[in-house]
Every structure is written in structure tokens, then in C-alpha cells.
Image (cartoon, helix red, strand yellow):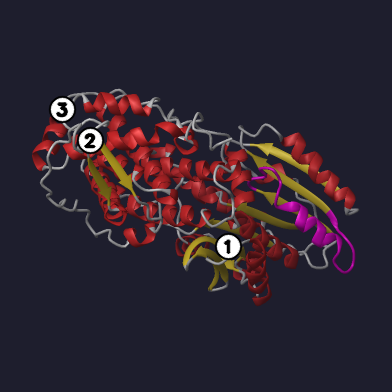
Amino acid sequence: MWGSESEEDEFFAALGYNVKSSDMADVARKIHQIDMAMGSDDDLSQLVSTETVHYNPSDLSSWLGSMLNTLPQIPSPADCSVNASVDLDFGSDLGSIPGKAVYPPEKKVKTTPCSVQETRSVVVDSQENGIKLVHSLMACAEAVQEENFQVAEALLKKVVFFAVSQAGAVRKVAIYFAEALAQRIYSWKSMAKLDSPPFFDNNLLRMHFYETCPYLKFAHFTANQAILEAFAGKKRVHIIDFSINHGMQWPPLLLALATRNGGAPTFRLTGIASPSHNDLQSVELTLAEFASTFKIEFDFRTFVMNSLADLNPSMFELREGEALAVNSILDLHQLLAKPGAIDKLLQLVHHLNPLIFTVAEQEANHNGNIFLERFTEALHYYSTLFDSLESCGSVSGDTKKIMSEVYLGQQIHNVVAGQGVDRVERHETLSQWRSRFGSHGFQPVHHGSDVYKMAIDLLARYSGEGYTVTENDGSLMLGWHMRPLIAASAWIRRRSSLRSVGLLNGGE
């Protein structure tokens, strides 16, 4: 379905551009012409000084054609050809990022115009272009930080050229970052504002991400093991899930509880959902069927909330003798957008006093105040994630894989283009979360060696080489080629505070 030349290129389509597969060569040639016009400092200055307004192109080929009309006379697409080899190793290119972005000088090559009688084949060095791509992205981000939007706009055009000359994860990541930079540039310039890329239902995208790669499976598995250990011997249990989504985390735990020694407990699940969730009834029916199959007495309630900070203890109807667990998978970082929101939620959890508080968060620092540092960290992080997706075994054009890329692309857009309270993808590292949890009266619970070994076995069954599990002071991290990407941790209320108030929640 995705391979036909009459169909749109699936990656550009996900970004909102109408580019047929058969037009990709023409798009590459036009972008190459633009790069030729920008090959000298004088030509770059001419582009920077132009007052031309370039609108968001739904038809990318026509848009590039209109851009060519504003540039000096250059060889026509029909007279020049570009043979672009590809290099999928973006990681080696990322190693060239300097501490402060400096756009590297291009090699000066004497050229002559192409003619009909004598055509010239331009061979693109993909490794060199990969380095130029990274430097162009960094230089553009630096210009954005300095609010030099004319230079940023000119550099963005070079990013697009170098990105199209690449393939695979390199091209996808670069174009997502370029799209986000363009959104920021045009919104700040108050020009003809770019249309935001199409946003899909995040619950649906997250489900595809879950099915495509092991990150959410790892988060669910480690949390479930910690909960299972905390619920040992308990006859009545209650879980509060801060993001119920499609409830994919809970069937394995229901099975584990049903087959444990001593029989299954009564199981109460309270799920928090966003207003965009439109299928909660289906989630309830599916989980109820699982519980019935495992002969577990099951009760399910949901609350639709705009923010987790709006929760209050009375909503959960805590019952005496009921063992409580609180679960948060990739939720907490979004509260950092509003002052005091994360503090309010952690105070709530501290008051609820669960037997276990399980947390998984992205292992990244995307919450800094300096835009260029945040951009650099995000470029490294998402390049690694996209690289790992290429290894997940999905065939080209696989819908689940494409939607997983869109899921990550929307995060990139928010990290780079989002501002103020609208920038919710404020990921922080495990060490930062440790400090925050500690200041709110929590202490870590170490994942045992058995959980570590089972996590490794899970990855071995699911995926090939490349994924790594590491232990970090009792918490577990899943990474790609030793670069941690997801951190899973577990917490309880600090024992000193428990003794002082006598509220240790033992359950039956």
C-alpha cells in the first residue's frame, strides 16, 4: 500500500506534506539547486535579506519551485542529476556536535552551468552531508535562540536539503526537528504562520508505540513486578493508575495474581484518563473479561481529568485493610509545565501512603531553560530512539511503526516549538526525580536481581541485539547501545515519617 509511486511518501504525509513517491527525485533535485545557490556567503546573504514569505507547503514540490524563482539563475532540474548514497549511522554524525554550534565552512568547488549537450552528475557524499546536516540543525537552533530569524530561516533550507539526501532514521529525525524549528521561527517572526503538523490521538499513537518497540513493555513489566511483590499475601488490593490509556499494563498482573500461592485477591482498579480518551467503556469490558477468565473479583472506576494536579484523596474511596499501589508511566514530567503542579501531586501520593509507588520516565533532560542545550539533548535522545525503531523488525511502510514515529515526532515538536505551559514534554533524568521524590518524603525501593534478569530475558524474546538493561542504584534503565532511554523506579513513603504518624498501610 505504501510502496506505490502514485501514493504519498508516508513520512512526509505524516508531517502534512503531499509528496508522491514518484516526486521524491524531483524534490531532491530542487533542494540540491537551492543548496547550490546557497553555496557561497554572498548567496546566503542574499537569501537572508530576502523579504519573500514562504508559506507552509502542502505540495512540497511546488513550494520548492516557488523558492527557486527567488534565487539567482542556477542549473535547471532537467539538466542536473543527483546520485545520493545513504548512511544510516546518525550516531557518528552526532559526535561532531560542538559545545557551541558553528556552521562548518563548505568546500569551495569550481562549477560550470550544466548544458543539454553535457550533463554533470553530482555525487553527494552522505557521510559529509550527515555532518553538515547536524551542524546545520545546531546552527539553526543557535540562531533561533539568538532570535536571528532571517539566518535561522536560511539555515533551515539547508537542513531540508541535507535531510532529503539521507535515509531511514536520519531523514526522519532531521525533518521532525526541522518542522519544529520552522514552527518556532515563523511564530516568532509573526509571518505567515506555519500550520502545525497534524496531531493524532495520543492514546492510539501510544498503543502503536507499545506494540512496535519494548520501551513501554519494559516500563509495565518492571512496575508490575514491584506491585506483585508489594501485594504478596494481600487479599484485597487497589491500584491507582495515573494514565489508564488502553489498560495494556494490567492483564499480565491479573494473571500473575491469579496464579500466585494463596489464590487471587479482590482487585480494584482506579484509572485516570484525559478528556481526549473516547473508549473507556471498551477498556473496562476488556479488563473485566480478563478478570473473569482468571476468576478474580474485579472493580473498575475511571476519572477524566485535565491534569493530575486536580486529583484529591477523597476521590479514591480508600478502604481499611486494602493494600494500595500507585502507578505512573511517562506521566509526571508533564506536570512540570505548571508551577506547583508536581508538588501537589506528590503531596497527594504521600498522603495516600501506598505500599508501592511505581514510576517510569524518559531518561533525558528536556526541561532546561536554555533552548540550545535543550535542543542538543533532544537531538541526541530522539536520534537514538529512532535508530532503535529501525531495528524493531517492522517492514517498510508498516503502519504501527509509522505511527510510533509520529508519536515521537509530536514529542519533538513540543520540546522544540512548545513554549510556556504548552511545552509539556519536560523530561528529566532519574537523578533529578530522585532529588524531587526525596524532598517530598519518599525513599526508593530497589528492584531485585530477579527482576533485572527477567527484564533481560523479556528483551531477548522481544528484540535482537542493541537493547541494554542497566541497574542504577536499585532502579532499572532500558537503553539502546548503552544510551539509557527509559528509567523505571519504585518508591515508598520514608519510614521515619511513617513511624511519626503511624500510617503504615499494611492491607489484609
Image spot of residue 488 (x, y percent): 58, 62
Of badges 2 and 1, the one in the foreground is: 2
* Residue 256, magenta (yes or no): yes
Tell me the number on the disc at residue 50: 3
Q: Amino acid at mark 3?
A: Thr
Question: What residue is rendered at 72% in x and 39% in y?
Answer: 302
Q: CA distance from mark 3 to mark 1?
A: 50 Å
Tell me the number on the disc at residue 191: none
Query: What is the quadrant of residue 59 in the picture?
Result: top left
Residue under label 1: 488
Image spot of residue 263 (x, y percent): 90, 63
Q: CA distance from mark 2 to mark 1?
A: 46 Å
**Residue situated furthest left in the rendering:** 42
Closer to the camera in the image, 156 or 199: 156
Task: Categorize mark 1 by other alpha carbons within 10 Å: few (<14), some (14-19), many (20+).
Answer: many
Vertical arrangement, residue 351 with respect to residue 8, above or below? below
Whether residue 125 is visible to the viewer of this picture, yes or no, is yes
Q: Which residues are magenta?
A: 242-266
Image spot of residue 179 (x, y percent): 37, 37
Q: Earlier in the sequence, mark 2 or mark 3?
A: 2
Question: What residue is rendered at 53% in x and 56% in y?
Answer: 361
Residue under label 2: 34
Closer to the camera in the image, 425 or 305: 425
Helix, strand or loop status at disc 2? helix
Of badges 2 and 3, the one in the foreground is: 2
> What's the magenta bit mostly, secondary-structure-wise?
loop
Does residue 113 appear to the left or right of 139 in the view shown?
Answer: left
Q: Earlier in the sequence, mark 3 or mark 1?
A: 3
Q: Amino acid at mark 2?
A: Ile
